[in-house]
Image (cartoon, grey):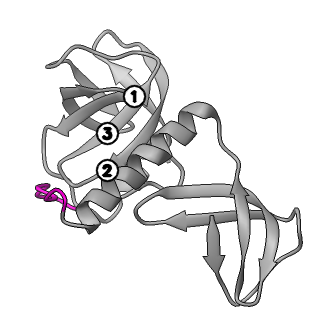
Amino acid sequence: MTLFAPVTGDIGGRVIAHCDVFGKLDGAVTRVLDRGFVARITASDSERRKLAARIEGYEKIKNYDILDRRIHKRIIPIDPRSTLLLGDGKRMECFVIDISTSGAAVSADTQPEIGTPLAVGAVVGRVVRHFDDGFAVQFVQEQDIDGLEHKLINPST
């Protein structure tokens, strides 16, 4: 990734960039520029595939190749790690891909059937759709955007 910034950093220095559209990008400086730097993103193969899909989707919307028909704006959480609570009481770690006031996209080691009730963090919803790397949860009640990320990511605090 190429970043324009008022500081440059040192070659090999760690960089964490929080992007509204793409989420948290972690990497190391590989080249210094006059007004910024180039960093190599540190990510697993799965994380790279997810980032590539986000970039591709963003490009299509940005270039008007497709319309963004979403009613509610999506937000990428700063820390995407959360917990799923299933109806049988089973808890498991999950990765929150993005959130809105009406739902969330989630990736986990399981893919519950459509219609399954569950909680993402402290917010209750139902699985409404599957996609390659996860599933979509529609919340039972629309949430206030203020504090929503905290409810999803840190429900016990």
Q: Which residue is mark 3?
A: 105
Q: Are marks 3 and 2 in contact (CB under 8 Å)?
A: yes
Q: Is residue 38 left or right of residue 147?
A: right
C-alpha separation, residue under disc 3 versus residue under disc 2:
6 Å
Where residue 133 appears, x then y in whole percent?
Answer: 39, 28
Question: Which residue does the numbered mark 2 point to in the structure image?
Answer: 99
Amino acid tagged 2: Ile
Classify mark 2: helix, strand or loop. Answer: strand
How far from the left and from the top, in percent, is residue 145?
27, 62
Query: Residue 37 falls in which quadrant of the image?
Result: bottom right
Determine the CA span between mark 3 and mark 1. 10 Å
Residue under pointer 1: 133
Tell us which disc is closer to us: 1 or 2.
1
Q: Nearer the viewer, residue 79 or 140?
A: 79
Mark 3–mark 1 CB contact (< 8 Å):
no
Residue occupying the point 40% across, 15% down? 110
On screen, residue 10 versus residue 27, left or right, reads: right
Q: Quadrant of the N terminus?
A: bottom right
Q: Amino acid at mark 3?
A: Ala
Q: Is residue 71 above or below residue 49?
A: below
Q: Are the two marked residues, 1 and 2, in contact with CB atoms closer than 8 angstroms?
A: no
The stretch in magenta equals: 65-74
Residue 19 visible here: yes
Magenta segment, prevailing SS (helix, strand or loop): loop
Label 3, secondary structure: give it: strand
Answer above or below: position of 7 versus 26.
below
Q: Magenta segment: does it hold 111?
A: no
> Element type at marker 1?
loop
Q: Nearer the viewer, residue 79 or 48?
A: 48
Does the magenta portion include 66? yes
Q: Earlier in the sequence, mark 3 or mark 2?
A: 2
